[in-house]
Image (cartoon, rainbow, N blue to C red):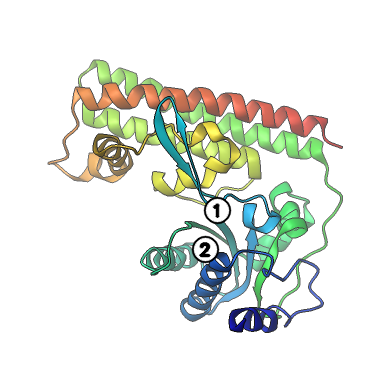
Amino acid sequence: MILNYIINNYFCLHKTYRMKKSILHLPNYAQKDLLFLIGEINKRLPQAEMIILYGGYATGKYIGYNEHEESGLPVSFITDYDILVVTSGISDKKASNILDNINDLYCKYPDYQTPVQFINDDIKTLNRQLEEGRYFYTQLKKEGIVLYDSGKFKTARMRKLNFKEIQQEAQKYFDEKFHKAELFLDHAIFDYKKQEYIMTSFDLNQATENLYYSIRLTFTLKNNKQHNLTKLSASVKRHSEELINIFPYDTIEDKRLFLLLKDAYVESRYNPDFLVTKDDIDALLPQVKRLRDITKRICEQRISEYGEME
């Protein structure tokens, strides 16, 4: 009851804002988590002008926790909190670093269960993208929930969406990132044949990163810079259930292989003691190829769907 009172007063500060403001329809655990995140953002990132919840928890299409079996193995899924933090007077890189630190702190939060995915934009960027009718931003304004608003800025008006333009942008992004992923896969196979397994791990890391970029850009027309494969994987899994189990995390060996792939971005270049074996690559290469095939199929399907929208 006290929590509802706090939230009710907190989100009634900006009645003139056109986006939704209330999270009272969300379960208590989500309300507590979001209030914690809002407090930490306001404390550690005073340049935050707006905090906007989007995605499953904003639209009501979220999964609190789901566990089932696939091919005899237990599989779990949970919808992330997707949060856009709009700033002014601070570089995107610095704001992103602060949000990464908040994410790390949140993971130590006593009631932590639901992951959070932050993205950040300057207010000028947000308004420019809205004025241009960029799909991700117009959907965000239509479906998002304002968790915090400093009241200093207004969001630009949306123009009518042109799905032909959306389709063209998505196709351009997909072509660029998927082509890079294919090149890195080619390099991986070349290095593998040369028994250069450490270099192969780096190639596979970059192929995976660009495949995840392909999905994010195709589905949202937005992609903040991110090299952490754990966070990249979490940010795209909502676009297809097939993406959930590309890299299994059920056994100690599964976890070791994925961490090896994730760490290869830095370790393969700077750690002389970084060890990658032929067996490691034999396990990882089919997984990355499977990710490539799924990425191509779901992105081409999404691009086709854009062309059918009116």
Mark 1 falls on what kind of element? loop
Where in the figure is residue 123, as x and y percent of width and height?
A: 66, 67
The residue identified by callout 1 is: 64
Q: Quadrant of residue 82?
A: bottom right
Q: Name which residue lies at 20% across and 20% down.
A: 195
Q: Quadrant of residue 137?
A: bottom right
Give the crowd class for mark 1: few <14, some 14-19, many >=20 residues within 10 Å.
some
Pick the quarter of the image with the N terminus.
Answer: bottom right
Rendered position, 47 above or below 125: below
Residue highlighted by disc 2: 92
**Residue drawn at (69%, 84%), measured in percent from left and top?**
9
- The answer to whether residue 277 is left or right of residue 247 is left
Q: Position of residue 57 (x, y in %)?
A: 63, 57
71 vs 281, left or right, is right
Residue 55 at least partly seen: no
Q: CA distance from mark 1 to mark 2?
A: 31 Å
In the picture, measured across the screen, residue 219 lies left or right of residue 92, that is right
Task: Kindly identify the residue that appears in the image at 35 percent across and 39 percent down.
Answer: 249
Amino acid at circle 1? Gly
Disc 2 residue type (three-letter) = Asp
Name the N-terminal-most of marks 1 and 2: 1
The C terminus sits in image quarter: top right
Name the residue nearer the viewer: 57 or 297. 57
Residue under the image location 68 percent in, 61 percent down? 126
Q: Position of residue 71 (x, y in %)?
A: 43, 24
Left or right of 154? Residue 170 is left
Q: Relative to the observer, which residue lies in front, 294 or 136?
A: 294
